[in-house]
Amino acid sequence: MGEQDWLTSLSASLVDVLNSVIVFAPRLLAAVALLLAGWLVARLLRMLITRLIASLDRLWHGFILRSGLEHLQARHPPAKVIGAVVFWLTLLFFLTAATEVLGLGVFVTWLSQVVAYLPVLVAGVLIVLAGFVVSSLVRDLVAATAASAGFAQGDLLGRSAQVVILLVAVVIGVDQIGIDITFLSIMAGIVLAATLGGVALAFGLGARNHVANIIAAHQVRQLYRVGDTIELAGHAGRVAEVTATRVILVTSAGRVAQSP
């Protein structure tokens, strides 16, 4: 009798398992179909978007060449990056739908939260990336402007401007993502103060000789006229021009630009 009960219990268990499989099979097939459809749709969207915005690659390449920012040339062009992002976002959307069909409540909740958080995350990352590009442009612009003005610390000024802009972009981006930025703001303030102090010191040191040359050139302009013969810093010759910071002499060796 015990053996008969055991066989009956085993048969009932097998029937329950079979019924569960029969009930679950349509859901599983539907989930697999959704994933397959999602994969196809994601590939199609990636291909279409990559082709539609392929012109961005040419625009970006031309921009960095004109701006002298070849170091910003990415290994992967923007069109492919955007296409990959669209591909995975589409696939994640269909994955969420598939888990909901399967009845995986906890997983559905988690995926829904991830999908809802993605736009915020993407916005924060884009802010940081934009800050990096803008800071690089400002760095080169400040360095070039300072160099043309005769400041020896032009590269330092450019780097300092880049650090300041990049710090601001990182703080804004992290805040956009939703991370507590209290500590980061304090550290950014300390770094910003140190950077500005260094810039002020470098500017003062670099401007000292520049200002001295401006004053001396002004005095030379008051005392002498173009065509006068003078001797300056070991060079004797005729004054050809007095610029804001230089005296141009015509000597026996040719034209000489000399600081007064």
Image: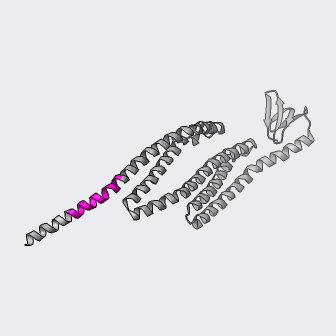
Q: Is the magenta stretch mostly helix, strand or loop?
A: helix
Quadrant placement of the N terminus = bottom left
Q: Where in the figure is residue 162, as x and y percent of width and height?
A: 64, 51
**Identity of the residue furthest to the bottom in this view:** 1
Nearer to the camera, 77 or 12? 12
Which residue lies at the image location 69% right of the left edge and 44% below the top edge? 141
Q: Is residue 59 visible?
A: yes
Q: Can residue 74 be seen in this view?
A: no
> Going by the image, does 191 lie left or right of 13?
right
Figure quadrant of residue 2: bottom left
Q: Where in the figure is residue 183, as x and y percent of width and height?
A: 58, 66
Nearer to the camera, 253 or 100? 100
> Going by the image, does 77 lie left or right of 231?
left
Give the extent of the magenta segment. 15-29
Which residue lies at the image location 12% right of the left edge and 66% below the top edge? 7
Which residue lies at the image location 55% right of the left edge and 54% below the top edge? 122
Quadrant placement of the C terminus = top right
Q: How many marks?
A: 0
**Identity of the residue furthest to the left in this view:** 1
**What's the coloring here?**
one colour
Q: Where in the figure is residue 13, as x and y percent of width and height?
A: 20, 65
| Residue 115 part of the magenta-drawn span | no
Q: Compared with residue 46, is residue 128 higher up or lower down, i.e. above or below?
A: below
Nearer to the camera, 239 or 112? 112
Which residue lies at the image location 59% right of the left edge and 39% below the top edge? 56
Q: Where in the figure is residue 132, as x and y percent of width and height?
A: 60, 50
| Residue 28 part of the magenta-drawn span | yes
